[in-house]
Image (tube, rainbow, N blue to C red):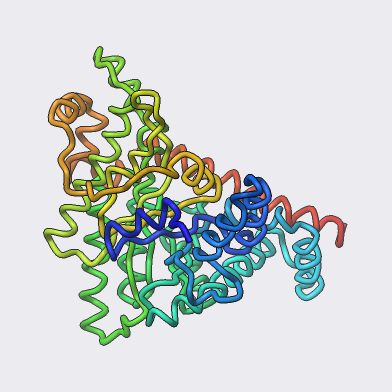
Amino acid sequence: MKKSPLERLMDTNSGLEIWWDSSPLIYTSWAESMVKKAPPDQREELGEQLRRFYDPQHPDEALFRGVTTNPPLSLKAIKSNESYWVQFVDSLIEQNPGIDKESLFWLTYKEVVRRGAEMYLGVFQRSQYRYGYLSGQVDPRFLTDKEKMVSQALELASLSPNVMIKVPGTKEGYEVIKILTSRGIPTNNTLSFVLPQFMAGANAVKEGLEIARRNGVDLSRWRSVITHMTARYGDLGDLRTEAEALGIDLSEGDVRWAEIAIFKKAYRILKERDYPSKMLICSMRFSPVVNGQKHCWHLEKLAGGNIVFTCPPSFIEGVFELLDRTEFRPQIDEEVPRDVLEKLLRIPYFEKAYREDGLTPDEFNKHPALVATGTEFSKATEEMVNFVAKRLAARCG
């Protein structure tokens, strides 16, 4: 069978991982719908390619090496099978008289995380705990509440041995990452966009590991990834507005290079200094258009890296449609064009993001991309709370 574009990308480095960026609970129905939409003569081949990434009949053979989820993605999983989850929430209400909507939400969310993690236990066990982690995120409404995040993280970690805790790139979040690492709990540093955050995450992990080793903590089921929410850095922050104010003309390609440059530098530093964390990229875009051809530089320019790409369903559909003929070659170590980098370094928003000490931990919490993303995720979490609240009102009102 013909290899898919993502499989060809994996061929550029044996350590390159592709993760599923959604709840595993929706994968089968999504894959079936994608096959149905394909031309009849392509359905068999496409179906086989998608089964190679995850087959519920043979989960331990999945090419997907892990999963990223969060409350918004868990809400999509619930909405994809709403009648079932209505019954599930109603049963929780019956079992927990007097329960409030926030507690009901948390129980429901934990069940979505637990079931998703269970689907990847085969990958986790077959790889001897190297792969098969599912990222369960602490509530994004508590980005600066250290105690709340630690408490929620411990609950999520207890659901399954392959649950990795997603912790935000706030000042308090890095304190949480250090604590969790010291206990041998795997972490995913999310809501992170700039090099100072990535270094804070890498150092929090390093310090946490030192504590764990001194205390004889079992680290056999531990790993760490640091997420670059790449296009959210370029699209949600002040890159374009600052450039315009300075009279600097930024093309779409320049914006993509800004994101890629930050990732490449972080990757190089972690590799050179032997940090144990692995870089992960999400929020990728099909961009820019070069000579009439749409590219995905986030994939192409980082091919060959010992890194993680986490891909949501819609992005995978685009990869299969737009990059079917793309031949990936290792480019992770290639330099950013000098003229582009010099232009970008004239913009304070980029210069601070590209320098290790460009932002203080207090400034992490005020970064426009973090604020915008945190607000978006918090609203989606409230939607999930409202979903269970309606059931609570219907049953107890």
Image position of 233 (left or right of 196): right
Query: Number of callouts in the render?
Result: 0
For the point 24% across and 16% down, the residue is: 248
Q: Quadrant of residue 119?
A: bottom right
Nearest the eye: 38 or 213 = 38
Side of 93 where 222 appears, left or right = left
Q: Quadrant of residue 55?
A: bottom right
User: How far across and how far down the image is residue 364, in percent?
Assistant: 32, 44
Looking at the image, residue 335 sits to the left or right of residue 52; the answer is: left
Farthest front residue in view:
41
Residue 84, image x, y percentages = 78, 64
Nearer the observer, 17 or 390:
17
Q: Residue at x 47, y 79 (%)?
A: 161
Q: Position of residue 246 (x, y in %)?
A: 24, 15
Counting from the top left corner in percent of width and height, residue 301 is at 27, 43
Rendered view: 105 above or below 293: below
For residue 214, side relative to residue 74 (left or right) = left
| Residue, far top | 247
